[in-house]
Image: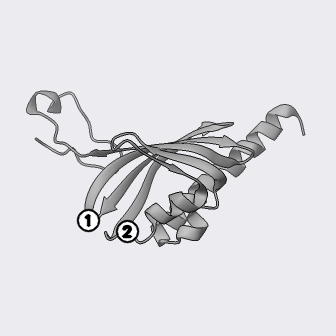
Amino acid sequence: MDTHEAHDAHDARTRAAIEGHWQASERGDVEAGHTIYAEDAILDYPQSGERFHGRSTIAAQRGGHPADRHFAVLRISGRAELWVSECVISYDGVPSYSVSIMEFADGQVAHETQYFGEGFGAPQRRLALAEPMPGREITRA
């Protein structure tokens, strides 16, 4: 196997691990969903200023969430040690748009930064210029 093939195989394993993480999250399987993290991983939520240290702390703060949550992955992109997931996470039916930036070391997430944003309506002045994203309708202001 040449170097290019080795990198492609590594990227395929990483992508599969990320997909498994989001699938476990959708099932509510906190334990399986957090095997992707290194024991000493860090999770940052910039919008609230929170930082969580360690796989067990990351899992604990996500476990037992009071809302009915669902995860829909829109896109996963990346290579080598840096990967980005674009998701819609619904809390009690209300969608929150999320970007997860995962930095890997030794095959596990060493640092994740996750951003969340509420949806918003498109203003009338842009409607003639826009087309809907695949599988979506444009939300109007």
Disc on the earlier residue, 1 or 2: 2
54 or 36, which lies in front? 54
In the image as oriented, which residue stretches furthest toward the right?
Answer: 1
75 and 20: which is toward the camera: 20
The answer to which image quadrant residue 133 occupies is: top left
For residue 65, the mark is 2
Going by the numbered disc 2, the residue's amino acid type is His
Neighbour tally class for label 1: few under 14, some 14-19, many 20 plus, Cα within 10 Å: few
Could you tell whether 116 is left or right of 18 in the image? left
**Residue at 58% over, 69% down:** 31
What's the amino acid at mark 1? Gly
Pick the residue in front: 3 or 114: 114
Q: Residue at x 21, y 27 (%)?
A: 129
Which residue is found at the position 63% from the left and 44% from the top?
Answer: 110
Work out which quarter of the rendered image holds the C terminus and state it.
Answer: top left
**What residue is shown with label 1?**
93
Q: How far across and down, in percent of the image, does residue 79 sit? A: 65, 36
Is 64 above or below relative to 129? below
Q: Quadrant of residue 128?
A: top left
Whole-number angstrom distance, CA of label 1 to CA of label 2? 14 Å
